[in-house]
Image (cartoon, grey):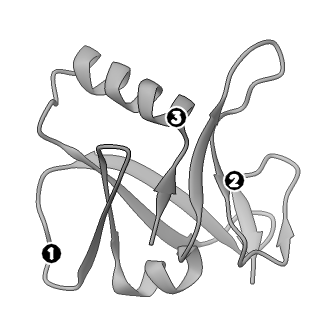
Amino acid sequence: MLFVSEIAKKKIEEIKLNENKPDYFVRVTVNGGGCSGLSYKMDFDNEIKPDDQQFEDKGVKLVTDLRSFLYVCNTTLDFSDGLNGKGFEFKNPNATRTCACGESFAV
């Protein structure tokens, strides 16, 4: 399962409205790279692929491919704003190490 915090839900809804993408979902993928070896990627998408894993939390549809899901299972998508805010961030219980920017991790 993938989860989304209440503040991330509000931000996703706001962005979807501003970009006129009301029927799109959030696609989360994991790619090689970054300071710690693996990095997160998040986009809006409207096309389901054969190996996609689909989840819904708090009314937000989250989709990931099967390979990425192995790395992000039980992860919560969060959002941090304010003076020291980083924007969207992943709270991944599978990560053994993360970089300071929070955009890459290792398992």
Q: What residue type is labelled 1?
A: Lys
- Cα separation between marks 3 and 1: 27 Å
Are dots 2 and 3 in contact, CB under 8 Å?
A: no
Q: Where is residue 36 in the image (x, y as percent from the top left)?
A: 80, 70
Q: Is residue 79 left or right of residue 9?
A: right
In the picture shown, does residue 13 fall above or below 28? above
Q: Position of residue 61 (x, y in %)?
A: 28, 52
Q: Is residue 86 left or right of residue 83?
A: left
Are dots 3 and 1 in contact, CB under 8 Å?
A: no
What residue is at 46 percent from the left and 25 percent from the top? 11
What residue is at 13 percent from the left and 67 percent from the top? 48
> Dot 3 corresponds to which residue?
6
> Dot 2 corresponds to which residue?
103
> Dot 1 corresponds to which residue?
49
Q: Quadrant of the N terminus?
A: bottom left
What residue is at 86 percent from the left and 72 percent from the top? 97
